[in-house]
Image (cartoon, rainbow, N blue to C red):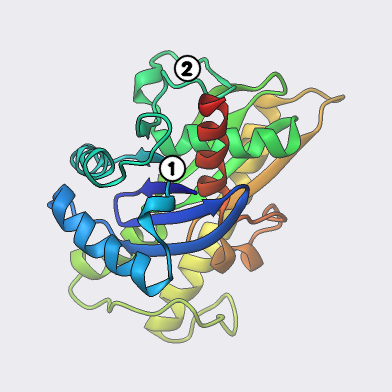
Amino acid sequence: MLLAVDVGNSHTVSGVFSGQTLIHQWRLKSDRDRTADELAIRYYSLFQMDGIDKENITGFIIGSVVPTLETSWLDFAAKYLNRCTIPPMSVSHKTDTGITVTTKNPSEVGADRIINAVAAWNRYKTALLVIDFGTAITFDCVSRRGEYIGGTIHPGIGISLDALAGRTAKLPRIDIDTTPESVIGNTTVAAIRSGILHGFGGMIDRMVSLLGKEMITADEEINIIATGGMAELIAPYSSSLNTIDPLLTLTGLRLIHERNRA
């Protein structure tokens, strides 16, 4: 079995694969001060609750945008997962992923963006736009030749809501799970809800249009795939989000591990 870990700024998503099948998945807050031993206490409890014997875990891979947690996780794997057939892996621009990073400074590209590109490329083998709704919203562009060529980064939905509530005197924190009755909000809460949902939906469509024009020619196909916790929330407000895969990053981690294990 493979333990795959995706460490984001806000949350850590981890999963256990048996072969190509994801059999267990957990989503926890990313605590930057966690040590390897604290991770062991937490995940041993999760393993026990879900009937996983850690002795059956023979592989470990992590993609992290939080350096301190990446170190803790690698220490955890080295200390407590002693059945791994290859050393615990951490994904970076130097990892053999099967795609080429062609940006000016490959070391600046977050591991999560590379991992998502790998999963999407293996799925479509065409020009791609990968949209990840995390703490930030990222658009990642992959050429039809399997080259990661760059993208854009935008403030995420949670950050925007926090900024509205934290930097204004009278605007409240709100729940945006409720569908706006109309685009024109007749209360403050309705106005914020409409602004966030319709506004981000419109931003997605605009960026897809602009990026697509730079990426492809008339005879090329471009596929768009979205992932991340907020993707399904925004999808009804965008005409571009047809394919959503909440497991895209974990799938990419599995594919990279399989490639390097082989």
- Residue lying at 28% horizontally and 63% vertically, measured from the top left: 44
Q: Secondary structure at mark 2?
A: loop
Where 170 sits versus 110, above or below?
A: below
- Residue lying at 65% horizontally and 47% vertically, measured from the top left: 225
Q: CA distance from mark 2 to mark 1?
A: 34 Å
The answer to whether one can see residue 208 in this image is yes
Question: Which mark is first along the chain, 1 or 2?
Answer: 1
Where 148 sits versus 177, above or below?
A: above
Q: Which residue is mark 2?
A: 103
Q: Is residue 58 left or right of residue 181?
A: left
Q: Is residue 203 left or right of residue 146?
A: left
Q: Residues within 10 Å of mark 1 (few under 14, many from 20)?
A: some
- Residue 77 placed where, x, y %? 28, 42
Q: Which mark is residue 141?
A: none
Count of numbered circles on the image = 2
Q: Amino acid at mark 1?
A: Thr
Q: Which residue is mark 1?
A: 58
Closest to the observer: 35 or 136? 35
Closest to the observer: 148 or 69? 69
Q: Secondary structure at mark 1?
A: loop
- Residue 61 placed where, x, y %? 41, 39
- Residue lying at 39% horizontally and 63% vertically, measured from the top left: 27
Q: Amino acid at mark 2?
A: Thr
- Residue 133 placed where, x, y %? 48, 53
- Residue 2 placed where, x, y %? 47, 46
- Residue lying at 37% horizontally and 41% vertically, measured from the top left: 83
Task: Look at the numbered discs 2 and 1 and tell me whether their residues touch, using CB distance below 8 Å.
Answer: no
Where 47 sits versus 66, above or below?
A: below
Q: Is residue 186 left or right of residue 35?
A: right
